[in-house]
Amino acid sequence: MTVHFEVLKAIAVPIAMDNVDTDQIFPSRFSSKDRADGKYGDYFLHDQRFDKNGQQNKDFILNDVRYRGAKIIVASKNYACGSARPGAIYSHLDYGICAIVSESFGSVFPTVAYKSGLLTIQVGKDTAQQIRDALLCNPGSQIEIDLKDQFISLENGQRFHFEIDHFIKTMFVEGVSEINFTLKYSSKIAEFEAKLPHSFPWLYGKGR
């Protein structure tokens, strides 16, 4: 899946819970569901959003109408830890989330999220706290992620720099998949392959 943007400006929702694991994000009992049914967004943080009777939990921030339509999550420590279930990524996307800013992530999640078009950005603890505080003071406000210049800007004028893996940044800024990115070097790959029989003849049953 390819996603193309240099700047993402959208409503952001603060989730100030540490250690939100992938079973909370996408409960295992939904793993047998087919994503094609279009309901993976309904399963996103399901047990925090709904009670045992399927009624909305009014105290959970995602059910606050002021954050409706949010495309960015600003999380706390160790977000999306636990297993590498793909549903945890797909449920974000199907709910409408395009990017997650967090103090830290589970070790597996950010290494695979970008492959499906979900951007993850890690910032310092103080930075994440300041962003969440600003969003809580002004519910429904937007933040801007400038991926090209690597800045997060708030409506109150605050601006924060972030680091990101160059390859992942390229995937989003250029809007290419890993396959298409590799194909840009097809001529060099073909040149390399043409030289192999001469450089390593024993690999081809020659020179024995």
Image (tube, rainbow, N blue to C red):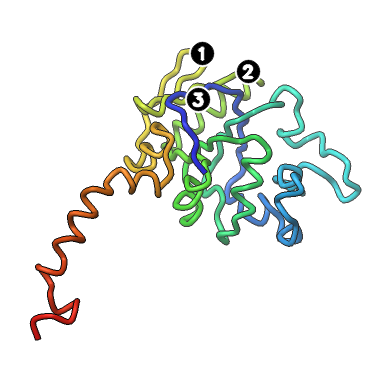
Q: Position of residue 200 (x, y in %)?
A: 13, 72
Query: Gap in Å between the C-alphas at discs 2 and 3?
Result: 19 Å
- Residue in front for this viewpoint, 48 or 83: 83
Left or right side of 141 for 164? left
Secondary structure state at the residue bearing disc 2: loop
Query: What quarter of the picture does the C terminus occupy?
Result: bottom left
Residue hosting label 1: 156
> Furthest-right residue in view?
53
Query: Gap in Å between the C-alphas at discs 1 and 3?
Result: 17 Å
Number of numbered discs = 3
Q: Tell me whether circle 2 and circle 1 mark residues in contact (CB < 8 Å).
A: yes
Q: Which label was assigned to residue 8?
A: 3
Query: Gap in Å between the C-alphas at discs 2 and 1?
Result: 9 Å
Q: Which label was assigned to residue 34?
A: none
| Vertical order, 90 against 142 (above or below) | below
- Residue in front for this viewpoint, 206 or 50: 206
First reached walking from the N terminus: tag 2 or tag 3: 3
The type of residue carrying mark 1 is Asn
The type of residue carrying mark 2 is Asn
Residue name at image x 36 percent, y 27 percent? 148
Residue hosting label 2: 138
- Residue in front for this viewpoint, 34 or 99: 34
Q: Position of residue 201 (x, y in %)?
A: 12, 75
Q: Residues within 10 Å of mark 1 (few under 14, many from 20)?
A: few
Determine the image quadrant of residue 146.
Answer: top left
Q: Tell me whether circle 1 and circle 3 mark residues in contact (CB < 8 Å).
A: no
